[in-house]
Amino acid sequence: MDADYVEFIQGVDVLLHECNFADEYEEFAKKTGHSCLTPVTEVARQARVGKLALFHFNPLATESDPVGLEKDLGIFSPVFLAHDGWELEF
């Protein structure tokens, strides 16, 4: 993913990033202006962020892992799925 904001987020402690779809819906993500898992984790890797928290999942997804994070793609770690009521501690 060639994101024009990689330099802007370079080295942040925690990156909160929208991730609406799993990778198999990449074309639909592009059409709707949303993101999917692998490109977002690649951006986090390129920017050398400390942690990645994903949010804004597809509201129609009913799985506990709506973007396929449990597939362990090995691109970036640590990455978390944010949810209502979730709190970050520093």
Image (spheres, rainbow, N blue to C red):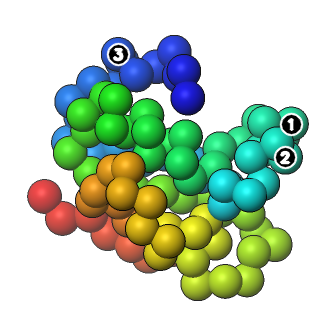
Q: Identify residue for label 2.
A: 28
Q: Quadrant of residue 65?
A: bottom right
Residue 82, compared with residue 44, is above or below; it is: below
Residue 44, compared with residue 21, is above or below; it is: above
Which of the two discs, 3 and 2, labels the residue nearer the N terminus? 3
Residue 82, compared with residue 43, is above or below; it is: below
Q: Residues within 10 Å of mark 2 (few under 14, many from 20)?
A: some
Total marks in image: 3
User: Disc 1 versus disc 3: distance between alpha carbons?
Assistant: 25 Å
Image quadrant holding the C terminus, namely bottom left
Residue shown at 64%/72% (left/top)? 66
User: Disc 2 versus disc 1: distance between alpha carbons?
Assistant: 5 Å
Q: Quadrant of residue 15?
A: top left
User: Is label 2 in contact with label 1 (beta carbons under 8 Å)?
Assistant: yes
Q: Is residue 67 left or right of residue 61?
A: left
Residue 69, compared with residue 24, is above or below; it is: below
Give amino acid for label 3. Answer: Glu
- Nearer to me, 74 or 43: 74
Q: Is residue 47 left or right of residue 22?
A: left
Q: Where residue 37 sits: x, y (%)?
A: 56, 53
| Disc nearest the viewer among 3 and 2 | 2
Q: Identify residue for label 1.
A: 31
Q: Which mark is residue 7?
A: 3
